[in-house]
Image (cartoon, rainbow, N blue to C red):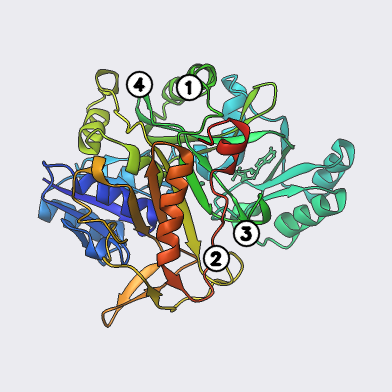
Amino acid sequence: MKLLVIGSGGREHAIAWKLAQSAKVTQVYVAPGNGGTAHEPKVQNLALSDQVALADFAIQEGIRFTVVGPEAPLAAGIVDYFQSRKLAIFGPSREAAQLESSKDFAKQFMTRFGIPTADYQSFTDPDLAHRYVEEQGAPIVIKADGLAAGKGVVVAQSLQDAHQAIDWMLKDQSFGQAGARVVIEACLQGEEASFIAMVDGEHVLALASSQDHKRLGDADTGPNTGGMGAYSPAPVVTPDIHAFVMREVMNKAVKGMAAEGRRYVGFLYAGLMIDPTKTVKVLEFNCRLGDPETQPLMARLRSDLVDLIEAALAGKLDHIEAQWDRRHAVGVVLAAQGYPQAPRVGDPIGGLQNKGAAGCLGQASSLADPASLDRLVFHAGTEERDGALLSSGGRVLCAVGMGDSIKLAQQHAYESMAQIHLDGGQYRKDIAWRARRNHGTSS
Ligand code: AMP
Ligand code: GLY
């Protein structure tokens, strides 16, 4: 069968790589893809972005189903459009994607269905917003309502920062329409985790737990980014917390969406804050897989992703289980110089023996038995020009290491990093530190 993946990041490289491993798959097209997907066996890039052209292509090629990576096409209604043309596509409709595309919608929805989240209020009037933060005090969190490519959240440590963020969003309209409304919520303390599931409208199949590292610098310092690394499993998600999140977050969300006529189908990602007393609250919903969480998750997924998605599209996720490699996976992101403010592009990337996911020394082919792989390199901001691999975005690639311990998985990821060269490239040296320090899994 032939499949189509929409997107160009590390997440989409990992999804395409995983789909291509299926014996049922002859070809995976990635639109538009990147320099890594261009070299993956059984994977081909497609220079199309317009949804009409993509649907025409899917019909012409007999694409079995399409998987959407990023939130923007989902919020723009690509699922509704593909369905109107009788094409199978895995992702939420535009209405259902509001769980991510409007933070105000998500907060109201969580309140309606008793899903645990921070107290909040929404504002369009800057004077009322300023008054509210004066009453509440700092620290406090200011969020643009709409999609802002991960940049629309300010965790204000002082009232001055909070006032500035309100003016920035509501008065200066730095995010345009996305910031015409702000959600102001209580600042939560604790450890974050990513809880990602597949949803078929009714049933929820949880994927393995993972944790992202949002800050640019070691020890979680510096500016927020799209994510500098991730690992799976995340020991902070204990079996009790897993059961709680399934019951109080995922099932409530899926039932609530269906009850309100917005059946949710697709990946559903709850960003969680878990405090020291193990109280769990939802920071946000995303209507997609996380990036970079997907890279370690796909490295660990032993089940055929085609089977899981077909079960989801048939409404039968209650009939299937996902098998996971018991090894740990650690993914370290290599970012360009100047990321996240002003990433430099066009730098040559050296040290990769193979331009697909089997990028590093010692890997025969990325289609080899996954159980024998312990190093993968998923590309994000890369492109090939005149035979040379060049950086083309802020997050350039993600090296994933697998190992029986977190330490070994880390070691494999960092050994790959040491081989790869990018002028001015930056990466964190401590991905998975929480798992090693807090949870005694340092062996
Ligand atoms: P979001 O896009 O809503 O996930 O926010 C991005 C990041 O901001 C989160 O991953 C957290 O690190 C931080 N954040 C968001 N909301 C809160 C909150 N209520 N309290 C503390 N930190 C938050
Ligand atoms: N890694 C965080 C996200 O994908 O939103």
Reading the image, the residue beneath label 3 is: 175
* Mark closest to the chain's N terminus, 2 or 3: 3
* Mark closest to the chain's N terminus, 4 or 1: 4
Foreground disc of the pair 4, 1: 4
Reading the image, the residue beneath label 2 is: 426
Foreground disc of the pair 2, 3: 2
Q: Tag on residue 203?
A: 4
In this rendered view, identify the residue nearer to me: 416 or 320.
Answer: 416
Residue at 43% in and 24% down: 254
SS at badge 1: helix
Q: Amino acid at mark 2?
A: Gln
Q: Residues within 10 Å of mark 3 (few under 14, many from 20)?
A: some
Estimate the x, y position of residue 415 in percent, counting from the top left. 42, 57
Estimate the x, y position of residue 360 in percent, counting from the top left. 32, 61
Residue at 16% in and 42% down: 22
Residue at 39% in and 36% down: 404
> In the rendered view, would you say 224 is above or below 301?
below
